[in-house]
């Protein structure tokens, strides 16, 4: 069975109504990114950081997967599909995708500030005083600026096996996630779905650009290129 790796970013979840973290002015919900997405920011104002992610988590329960998420999941009927996502929501899983790698963490998980290997499933808010089994404060299971990306090696390993690479809703400007495209085998077809594509057909060999939003682009991709 042919292998597809799908690299997704905020654009695919935006169509479900999830706000993208970063606004046009570079702020995240009115906050400088280092205030709410860095270890230093958490140390300075843990209440602010916890509230920021608590709001993001609550928003998850008001949205549902869109047809792009569903279309990707349905590819598993004919292909071995792995989604490597920069998104921290669970919309791919809810749509039915069974192999999802979250490069930047997950909103529905918390982890210990003392031991990063102590990770817990959560659906409610994280508050000051919520402790892990080793009596350390819990924090969002999110990769903040300045932190390593522990799932990157797994993402690289999976991408290197792909027979097709599909990129959806990401600017391809955020590293290290954007570097994954360089790990595919020679001659592997790349499909880039984005209404304002940041890369061009001459940037990579075998690149097909579908200049549409995710819901339309996935439908075109499946019907025109992957229907066999």
Image (spheres, grey):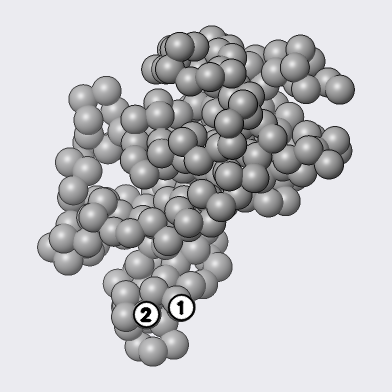
The furthest residue to the bottom: 134
The residue carrying pointer 2 sits among few (fewer than 14), some (14 to 19) or many (20 or more) residues within 10 Å by Cα, namely: few
Marks 1 and 2: CB-CB under 8 Å?
yes
User: Residue 79's quadrant in the figure?
Assistant: top right
Name the one closer to the observer, 133 or 225: 225
Q: Residue at x 53, y 19 (%)?
A: 205
Gap between marks 1 and 2, in whole Å?
A: 6 Å
Q: Residue at x 59, y 36 (%)?
A: 185
Q: Is residue 38 left or right of residue 158?
A: left
User: Residue 12's quadrant in the figure?
Assistant: top right
Say which residue label 1 marks. Answer: 118
Local SS, label 2: loop
Q: Quadrant of the N terminus?
A: top right
**Residue 137, numbered label:** none
The furthest residue to the front: 186
Q: Quadrant of the C terminus?
A: top right
Against 1, is 53 above or below? below
**Residue 115, numbered label:** 2
Q: Position of residue 124 (x, y in %)?
A: 49, 62
Res. 76 in view: no
Q: Position of residue 109 (x, y in %)?
A: 49, 63
Q: Position of residue 145 (x, y in %)?
A: 26, 51
Local SS, label 1: loop
Q: Is residue 98 left or right of residue 58?
A: right
Against 105, is 132 above or below? below
Q: Position of residue 176 (x, y in %)?
A: 36, 44
Name the one closer to the observer, 161 or 87: 161
Res. 154 in view: yes
Against 166, is 215 above or below? above
Q: Residue at x 45, y 53 (%)?
A: 152
């Amino acid at each position: 069975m042919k292998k597809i790796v799908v690299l997704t970013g905020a654009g695919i979840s935006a169509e479900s109504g999830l706000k993208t973290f970063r606004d046009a002015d570079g702020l995240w919900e009115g906050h400088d990114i280092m205030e709410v997405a860095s270890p230093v920011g958490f140390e300075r104002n843990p209440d602010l950081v916890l509230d920021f992610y608590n709001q993001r988590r609550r928003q998850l329960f008001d949205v549902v997967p869109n047809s792009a998420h569903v279309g990707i999941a349905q590819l598993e009927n004919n292909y071995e599909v792995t989604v490597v996502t920069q998104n921290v929501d669970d919309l791919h899983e809810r749509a039915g995708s069974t192999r999802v790698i979250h490069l930047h963490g997950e909103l529905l998980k918390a982890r210990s500030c003392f031991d990063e290997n102590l990770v817990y499933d959560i659906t409610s808010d994280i508050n000051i005083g919520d402790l892990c089994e080793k009596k350390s404060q819990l924090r969002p299971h999110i990769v903040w600026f300045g932190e390593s990306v522990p799932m990157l090696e797994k993402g690289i390993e999976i991408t290197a096996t792909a027979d097709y690479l599909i990129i959806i809703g990401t600017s391809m400007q955020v590293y290290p996630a954007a570097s994954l495209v360089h790990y595919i085998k020679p001659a592997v077809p790349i499909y880039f779905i984005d209404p304002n594509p940041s890369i061009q057909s001459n940037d990579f060999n075998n690149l097909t650009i579908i200049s549409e939003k995710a819901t339309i682009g996935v439908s075109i991709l499946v019907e025109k290129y992957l229907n066999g």
